[in-house]
Image (cartoon, grey):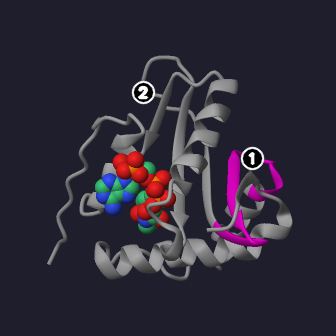
Amino acid sequence: MEKIIIRKAKVDDLNDILRLNLDLFKKEHREYDKSMDLKWTYGKEGKSYFKKGASGKEGFCVVAENNQKIIGYLCGGLYDHGYRIKAVYAELENMIVDKKFRGKGIGKMLAKEFLKWCKVKKANYISVTASGKNISGIEFYRSLGFKDYDVTLEIKVK
Ligand SMILES: CC(C)(COP(=O)(O)OP(=O)(O)OC[C@H]1O[C@@H](n2cnc3c(N)ncnc32)[C@H](O)[C@@H]1OP(=O)(O)O)[C@@H](O)C(=O)NCCC(=O)NCCS
């Protein structure tokens, strides 16, 4: 495998990040969650969210590059949890590594950059939410030290 570069995202990466985010949404939609809105990524909200992240205006966004091609990304940010004790709360919001490059340590490299950023921001808690059925994603987060915190239960009304 050629060299993998992990670097902060730039506005020029926006199209690649959008492409990968739609891959993530399609995977979640296909495998676990039919309520994922496949129009969100390229809609007004999705584009604005990723543009802010990629430009560094808001939150944190990092990409993995192989042979000048973006093959993974991670976005996260800080959150205000009004109902919890006063502290700095961070959230790993979404990430994906291109299927061909999974299991090679790239996800871990992306996550480590985020954890470093959280430290700089003096975050006290870092959370991530995954679909309950995304066992490999959950195992990945556990391998980084994340522990179960909340369980969301839902019922689909018929
Ligand atoms: C989850 C994901 C980002 C992990 O990235 P990755 O590059 O494949 O992960 P890494 O190779 O860095 O793995 C790091 C560790 O995570 C664990 N891990 C990774 N994939 C795993 C799997 N499928 N099952 C169990 N553990 C896994 C392992 O402990 C691994 O350490 P090891 O290589 O020493 O065994 C990637 O698999 C992916 O893009 N999945 C689809 C999208 C997704 O689920 N995103 C997260 C939810 S938003």
Quote the CA–CA distance across marks 2 and 1: 23 Å
- Amino acid type, residue under disc 1 in the picture: Glu
Q: Quadrant of the C terminus?
A: bottom left
Q: Is residue 48 above or below residue 16?
A: above
Looking at numbered disc 2 in the image, what kind of residue is underneath it? Tyr
- Quarter holding the N terminus is bottom right
Position of residue 2 measured from the top left corner of the image (x, y, whole percent): 68, 67
Residue shown at 74% from the left, 76% from the top: 15
Using the image, tell me which numbered label, if any, was put on residue 25. none
Q: Secondary structure at mark 2?
A: loop
Specify the segment rendered in magenta.
54-71
For residue 83, the mark is: 2
Specify whether residue 63 is painted magenta. yes
Is 127 in front, or is 105? Answer: 105
Question: Which quarter of the figure has residue 10?
Answer: bottom right
Res. 49 image quadrant: bottom right
Q: Residue furthest front?
A: 1
Task: Answer few, some or many: residues within 10 Å of disc 1's Cα (few below 14, many 20 plus, some between 14 and 19).
Answer: some
Q: Which comes before the other along the chain, label 2 or label 1? A: 1
- Seen from the viewer's position, the closer of residues 8 and 36 is 8
Question: In this image, 155 relative to 53: left or right?
Answer: left
**Number of the label disc, if any, that sits on residue 58:** 1
Horizontal side of 76 relative to 66 (left or right) equals: left
Q: Residue at x 42, y 24 (%)?
A: 84
Percent coordinates x, y for residue 97 in the rendering? 54, 66
Residue 114 lies, with reference to residue 67, above or below; the image says above
**Residue at 77 percent of width and 63 percent of height:** 51
Q: Nearer the viewer, mark 2 or mark 1?
A: 1
User: Residue 124 in magenta?
Assistant: no
Q: Position of residue 134 (x, y in %)?
A: 30, 62
